[in-house]
Amino acid sequence: MMDNEIISDIPRGNWVDRWLPSNIRPYAQLARFDRPIGTWLLLFPCWWSLALAIEDWTNVTEFLWLFILFGIGAKVMRGAGCCLNDIADRNFDSGVARTKDRPIPAGIISVKQALFFMAMLSTLGLIILVQFNNFAIAVGAVSILLVAVYPFSKRFTYWPQFILGLTFNWGALLGWAAVRGEIQIPAILLYIAGIFWTLGYDTIYALQDKVDDAIIGIKSTTLALGQRTRAWLYIFYSFAIFFMGLCGWFLELSWPFYVGLCCAAVQAIWQVKKLIMTSPNDCLAKFRSNRLFSWFFLGGIIASQIQ
């Protein structure tokens, strides 16, 4: 049984409530601008890949520009993805305590308005994408297929977290392509690592809705794994760490990389060991803590590259 905590999907009293006009506020909430963790989780595989692919770290302007472009791109494309997700899930969201006050199921924003806003964000994302080389543009364009499939995956598979992993970690391929103009083995290893990482953190996230999902017919890894969820979380994170390490080994990175990787591994073990699976608040906190996991890994990559 889940405990009696009820978590609204929309935080109150933050900068969106304080600073944005009332007619704009629902759009910021729809795009999750007030909940940046999703942007971070989309962005970090891009930054990891960039940091691994860049060979000349003396050209500070070039790599900072790439990091900024990917940061803006992650922000707007995550917002566009959230619009599509909420349009697709509007009937389901109204039956889940955590999501029933989202702008679309609450009737604050219409589907037509959400589609228009999504188109605006997607256009901004396209403007970012065309700043890269032609191969990277093609790689980025392919990801649209995954973005379109993911919102509907929970209807036909108990592993929508795997589809999310394929989607959210595409930046591991795109970042490498933007720097090297091709996809090489390290990028593929990093992509696989990211998929397992996403299986871990999004399974934790899905624990918040386990009861409601079972009632309304939404599928997730938490429902598929049941009492074995904690054991599988260890497996997911272990494979993520393994493939991250394999990527570093393939690139012959120096010892700081492995220090960062070990710190990330310890953080992952802490997540799973201390996770209170019946507490939505704790599940959300552990999910959000993956930002720290990501910083550890990125720090190790950069330290090894500039040593």
Image: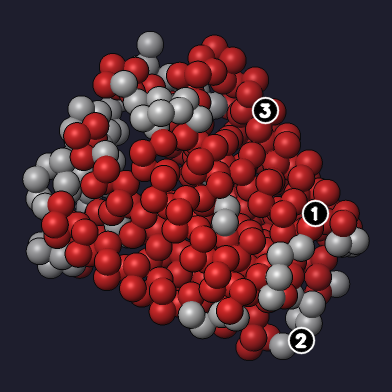
Disc 3 secondary structure class: helix
Give the image location of residue 146, x and y in percent: 47, 50
> SS at mark 1?
helix
Q: Which mark is nearer the camera, 3 or 1?
A: 1
Q: Position of residue 52 (x, y in %)?
A: 74, 66
Gap in angstroms between the C-alphas marked 1 and 2 = 23 Å
User: Would you name the residue on which mark 2 appears?
Assistant: 58
Front residue (pair 16, 126): 126
Disc 1 residue crowd, few under 14, some 14–19, many 20+, Cα 10 Å: many
- Looking at the rendered image, the quarter that the N terminus falls into is top left
Q: Is residue 81 left or right of residue 223?
A: left
**Image point (47%, 34%), residue name:** 160
The amino acid type, in three-letter code, at marker 2 is Thr
Give the residue number, with chain letter if any, for mark 3: 234
Q: Which residue is painted at 88% across and 54% down in the image?
A: 249
User: Which mark is first along the chain, 2 or 3?
Assistant: 2
Compared with residue 148, is residue 232 higher up or lower down, i.e. above or below? above
- Which residue is at the front of the view, 42 or 37? 42
